[in-house]
Amino acid sequence: MNLPLDISHAAQTLAQFLDSSNSKLVTAESCTGGGVAQVFTDIAGCSAWFDRGFVTYSNTSKTEMLGIDAKIINQYGAVSHEVASLMASGALQYSHADYAIAITGIAGPTGGSPKKSVGTVYIAVQKNQSEAIITLENFIGNRSEIRAQAILKALQLIPSNYTQ
């Protein structure tokens, strides 16, 4: 896959961070549909630091695969700070990883509302035994552009928030 240079560079930077700290990563993705995992598996040798990826597009899959209580999804919505945080912690719980990236959002072109417009994306990163760091983004563009922006931002969050 030919990636935009910024995504490719961010993936390589994160790969070097994980490799040099002898750490493993897990992903839990909704609106990006496994795009972060695909970026990682395009890098030769990723098995040294990429543990697994969960694509939890439906609410049921978030409950079944990541252990998120359906009541929380119903209360806050699948696209929320709370669900992004629980996606990250659930991914860590059901993997052998040291770090997690979780993404939930509305990539469009439909699905937005006055409270949560198309382009609303929550990205959570979490290190084992630590609180999740969650960002709320409001990306602009078509479905592919929103997903690419979410992937790029997610790749940048671990190196910028954790030091070795």
Image (spheres, rainbow, N blue to C red):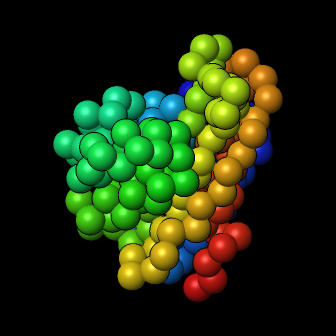
Query: In the image, what residue occupies the spot 58% across and 67% down?
Result: 133
Residue 110: percent from left, percent from top: 60, 14
Image quarter where the N terminus lies is: top right
Residue 139: percent from left, percent from top: 75, 35
- Foreground residue, 145 or 21? 145
Can residue 95 be seen?
no
Query: In the image, what residue occupies the spot 39% across and 76% down?
Result: 128
Q: In the image, is 115 to the left or to the right of 141?
A: left
Residue 140: percent from left, percent from top: 79, 29
Residue ranking furthest to the left: 64
**In the image, residue 53 above or below residue 14:** above
Query: In the image, what residue occupies the spot 53% across and 47% down?
Result: 80
Q: In the image, is 30 to the left or to the right of 142?
A: left
Query: In the image, what residue occupies the spot 63% across and 41% down?
Result: 121
Residue ranking furthest to the front: 75
Image quarter where the C terminus lies is: bottom right
Image label count? 0
Residue ranking furthest to the bottom: 164
Residue 134: percent from left, percent from top: 59, 61
**In the image, residue 11 above or below residue 59:** below
**In the image, residue 101 above or below residue 39:** below
- Foreground residue, 9 or 131? 131
Can residue 9 be seen?
yes
